[in-house]
Image (spheres, grey):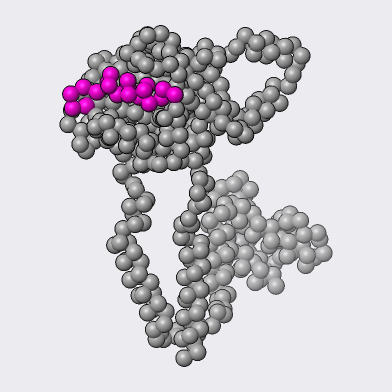
Amino acid sequence: MKERLLTLALAMGALAAFYAVMAPKPQGPQQQATRPISTEAGPNGYLGMVRWLESERVPVLSLRERFPKLSDVPGLESHTGNLLITTAPYLYPVRDSEILPLHGWVQRGNTLLIVAGLSDTPEWSMEPFGDTEFLEHLQSITRMQFTTHVEEDDEDAEREDTEESRPASDSVYRQRESALTRLPAPLRLEMRPAGAHPLLEGVSRVSASSEYPTSKWDGWARDTGALELAHDPASGVPVLWLLSEGNGQIIVSAYGSILGNKLLGENDNARLLANIVRWSLRGDGKVIVDDAHQGLVAFYDPDAFFGDSRLHSTLWWLLGLWLLFVLGSQRLRPSQSSWNPVDITGFVRATGGFMARVMRPATVGQQMIANFFNDARKRIGLPADGTPMWDWLSAQTVVSEQDVARLQALHARVQQGRRVNLSQLHNLLIRLRAVLS
């Protein structure tokens, strides 16, 4: 009985150790920045935008597949007149195979709104395991070119640093360290209309924020013209563009934080969104929020998987069967001696086989002949250097001339590196040793 109780205690201890190591641990609130997805109620989520649009009877759908599945979104009846809102940088980077289907979808008469964290750096964009090629992917989607905006004062400062031979590595290191350091307070940014346009009707100022240091970016279309709709009032750098794409259009915002829950109600952010929705939707068109590239996907949903009651039932059954196996009667295996003597014949055979595989026959033959003459040289008091003693061997009356001639011929072959029959050489040397002993 004591053995069973000890076994039960050890089994429970093993189960507790397995749980401590393998089971997922609850994370503290706001340990990771909330992401811009349609179901997120946190500061950076889009749940406020979704509920507001639905209250205005604007249908909103969640895209939880990659862009080639745009036409198969559940609830999407019309293939034209829709608005897709996608936010970058992505958590799941866009693939090259998605670019052409996305452009084809827009060209059929849909609108793509890209809210990109270019001129602001939201906290969710600095999370690890994100899109390391964010700029290249953005340029592929928009067919625009983006370069860092440099002020004239900055150019003069860089020129002075070059003249003073300032170490470039120190400057690069300081820039990287500064870019990864969270600001004590979020940087407040704005966009203001650059002129009259239906998308900017009633819009005078749109707010954005950046939790990390950021820089301004200039953008222009490589193939077709891009209409600059709004700019940053502090620097004059454009931050909102409109591009034509077949029968559709692409709207690019250099601020990635303007539609989040914490900023949608500020200034004219909601008005800008309302103008884009009203201008883009046609007929049965719907607003589609790209949740897939921000981590909310249909092909794997961890919350649904771990929340499935069938998984819990299976785990309980496995635990019960495991305890039954541990506590059930089990016959002990007979003890076996760990000592296993090695047969000397097998050892010699294995060693010989190893040597035969890694050494050339000519080399083995040379060493066998050298060993034979070394034994003879030691017997008559000469140094054992392996030098053949043909005159001495021929003078031995007990040795036949045929054996001496045969050994000389085999010695000549191995000296030339030619192959010899080692078995015949071994038998010959054994015979000579026997008559000389």
- Which of the two residues, 89 or 36, is positioned nearer the viewer here? 36
Instruction: State the image quarter where residue 234 is shown.
Output: top right
Instruction: State the image quarter where residue 374 is shown.
Output: bottom right
Number of numbered tags placed on the structure image: 0
On the rendered structure, is 12 left or right of 399? Answer: left
Residue furthest bottom in the image:
1
Q: Is residue 256 depicted above or below 191 in this figure?
A: below
Residue 343 is at least partly visible in this image? yes
- Which of the two residues, 31 or 274, is positioned nearer the viewer here? 274
Q: Position of residue 300 (x, y in %)?
A: 34, 47
Q: Is residue 30 depicted above or below 276 in this figure?
A: below
- Look at 32% across and 21% down and name the residue there: 276
Q: Position of residue 401 (x, y in %)?
A: 63, 60
Q: Which residues are magenta?
A: 267-285
Q: Is residue 386 depicted above or below 63 in this figure?
A: below
Instruction: State the image quarter where residue 427 is shown.
Output: bottom right
Residue furthest right in the image:
381
- Look at 64% across and 31% down and name the residue there: 177
Q: Is residue 270 magenta?
A: yes
On the rendered structure, is 73 left or right of 41? Answer: left
Q: Is residue 165 depicted above or below 336 in this figure?
A: above
On the rendered structure, is 274 left or right of 239? Answer: left
- Which of the two residues, 388 or 193, is positioned nearer the viewer here? 193
Residue 147 is at least partly visible in this image? no
Q: Is residue 69 magenta?
A: no
- Which of the two residues, 378 or 253, is positioned nearer the viewer here? 253
- Look at 50% across and 16% down and name the residue there: 232
Q: Position of residue 59 (x, y in %)?
A: 24, 33
Q: Position of residue 407 (x, y in %)?
A: 62, 57
Quarter of the image where the C terminus is located:
bottom right
